Amino acid sequence: MSKQKIVDKIGITASTICAIHCALAPLLITIAPLVGLGFLFEEKFETIFIMATVGLAFLSIAWGFLKKHRSFEPFYLLLLGAAIFYISHNFHDLMHFIPHPISMGLGGLSIAISHYINLRLCHHYDCDKSCSNPLHSQ
């Protein structure tokens, strides 16, 4: 398995964990401190995890873009997810219409989908490149 695929799969996993964490936060926030996991719901942890998730996504998608597919499609979803994270994390007191856990979960889901699209585009690039069909080499 290529390094790029491994990075994308790690990114999909991290983004999905982020989305699940955010969606379940209202249910788990009272239980977590009782079992020693209260730090998972502190703002510092959330900020570090968001930065790591967005940074990993950017590196992975840029790698796929530069070395393989040249498609901006994964970047659009990454930017959407990063914008949702930024707005929800920094202006959650102004966003009365979307609860914080839902908006953060949508941001994580958007970034996970951007990784998946990047993975698919890289796979199609590799298939087209190695395919013996002359129509695919154009």
Image (spheres, helix red, strand yellow):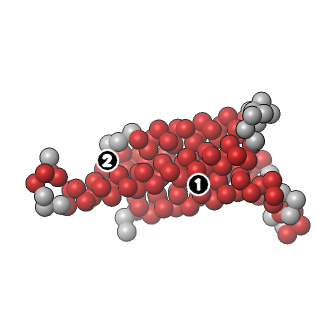
Quick one: which residue is furthest to the front in this view? 97
Using the image, tell me which numbered label, if any, was put on residue 43: none
Residue indicated by mark 1: 15
Which tag, 2 or 1, sits closer to the chain's start?
Answer: 1
Quick one: which residue is furthest to the top in this view? 94
Q: In terms of depth relative to the viewer, which is nearer, 52 or 112?
A: 112
Residue at x 48%, y 62% (from the top left corner): 9
Q: Position of residue 23 (x, y in %)?
A: 71, 53
Residue at x 78%, y 33% (from the top left corner): 96
Question: Which of the 4 image quadrants contains residue 120?
Answer: bottom left
Quadrant of the image for the N terminus?
Answer: bottom left
Residue at x 65%, y 37% (from the top left corner): 86
Can residue 39 be spotted in the picture? no
Q: In terms of depth relative to the viewer, which is nearer, 105 or 65?
A: 105
132 up-or-down from 48: above or below:
below
Taking 12 as reference, is 85 left or right?
right
Question: Which of the 4 image quadrants contains residue 3?
Answer: bottom left
Q: Position of residue 103 (x, y in %)?
A: 68, 42
SS at mark 2? helix
Q: Position of residue 54 (x, y in %)?
A: 56, 46
SS at mark 1? helix
Q: Please name the amino acid that badge 1 sits on.
A: Ser
Can residue 97 be spotted in the picture? yes
Q: How far apart in space, not on screen, are marks 2 and 1 (Cα)?
A: 22 Å
Residue at x 21%, y 56% (from the top left corner): 129
Taking 103 as reference, is 34 left or right?
right
Q: Please name the amino acid that badge 2 sits on.
A: His
Taking 138 as reference, is 16 left or right?
right
Few, some or many C-alpha atoms within 10 Å of disc 1 (few <14, some 14-19, many ≥20)? many
Residue indicated by mark 2: 69
Asked whether disc 2 touches disc 1, contact meaning CB atoms under 8 Å apart, the reply is: no
